Image (spheres, rainbow, N blue to C red):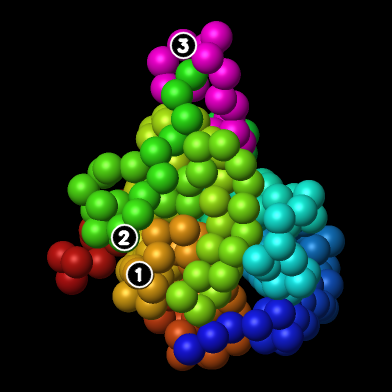
Amino acid sequence: MCWSGEASTVMALIGLTGSALEARKSFTYPSELGGGSEWKVEGVSGKHTLRALTLAYFSLMELLQAFNYTTLGMVDPDNALYALLGYVHISFQPLFITWFCLSFLPRTRRMYWVTSMTILSAGVSFLFLCGLIVNPSLPGCFAVPCQPLTDIGLLMQGDGMASCSATSFVSSMGDWHIAWQWASNDCHFIRNSYFVIAFLLPIIYGAYRVMLYSLILGPLLSLMLTNNPHELAAIWCLLSIGFLSAVKIPWMERFLTCKHASWKECFASFKK
């Protein structure tokens, strides 16, 4: 199995098309509150707008990977730049994953959580960027370069970091997709903050079905598709295009959508 720049380009175009269709719904579908379109009444907090932003953002990653394929195997600044841009894109994914999960909540529940979760997710995104800070004059793990992994099995033991290079940014060909290595520090809590936002907080605000969907299409499936620890991030980003299926397949959207406006209402339904 081997991916290519052309395949990434096709995926990017599909994702951007899906994003445009979701954005169109925001301008044409009436708001649940009445008084005009979803965009006019709810603005960026409308569910179709949140989905459009998420699909567009992950589609841009596919576009980045398409360009990245032109430099694989080379030792030049462009090769390193694409690896760096991959890290920056991943850094802000928690924010868009949060918006996507919130889009499957009823409006009252979504509006209750959207501001606090956006601020928290944005904070974690900036924290993730701090993973690039490595300097011996800094305290703790910020002074220590990350330890590269040689085997994906070591990742489960907590020994070293995936997509790590102690000294440079590198884009190379993995088992079948792009393998990135980033010169980053040894602060594991920075990398783990991504998982807190993507797979823990959705349970708290009620989007647990979407969380399970993205968990299966993200880290679990990625671990099954490669033995190269540096390839996991790119494969995970590729599989995230599965978000498009969640909003375009009616029965899947209905299944992932939370029906209850609060946890109290949810628990009350269990008693009936």
Residue 238 is marked as none
| Relative image position of residue 183 (x, y in whole percent) | 57, 39
The residue beneath circle 1 is 227
Q: Residues within 10 Å of mark 3 (few under 14, many from 20)?
A: few
Q: Position of residue 230 (x, y in %)?
A: 46, 58
Q: Is residue 137 found inside the magenta-colored segment of the image?
A: yes
Judged from the image, the secondary structure of the residue bearing numbered disc 1 is loop
Mark 1 → mark 3, Cα distance in angstroms: 34 Å
Residue at 76%, 72% (x, y): give it.
70
Label pair 2/1, CB-CB below 8 angstroms: yes
- At a point 42% along the width and 30% down the height, the residue shown is 187
Q: Report if the CB atoms under discs 1 and 3 are less than 8 Å apart.
A: no
Mark 3 / mark 2, whichever is N-terminal: 3
Please report whichever mark, 2 or 1, sits nearer to the chain's N-terminal start.
2
Nearer to us in this view, 46 or 198:
198
Answer whether residue 124 is visible to the viewer in this image: no
Residue furthest left in the image: 271
Residue hosting label 3: 139
Q: Is residue 33 left or right of residue 207?
A: right
- Give the mark nearest the N terminus, 1 or 3: 3
Cα distance in 3D space between marks 3 and 2: 29 Å
Image spot of residue 41 (x, y percent): 78, 59
Residue plotted at (35% across, 69% down): 227
Residue 120, quarter of picture = top right
Q: Which residue is mark 2?
A: 152
- Whether residue 81 is visible, yes or no, is yes
Q: Position of residue 236 (x, y in %)?
A: 49, 67
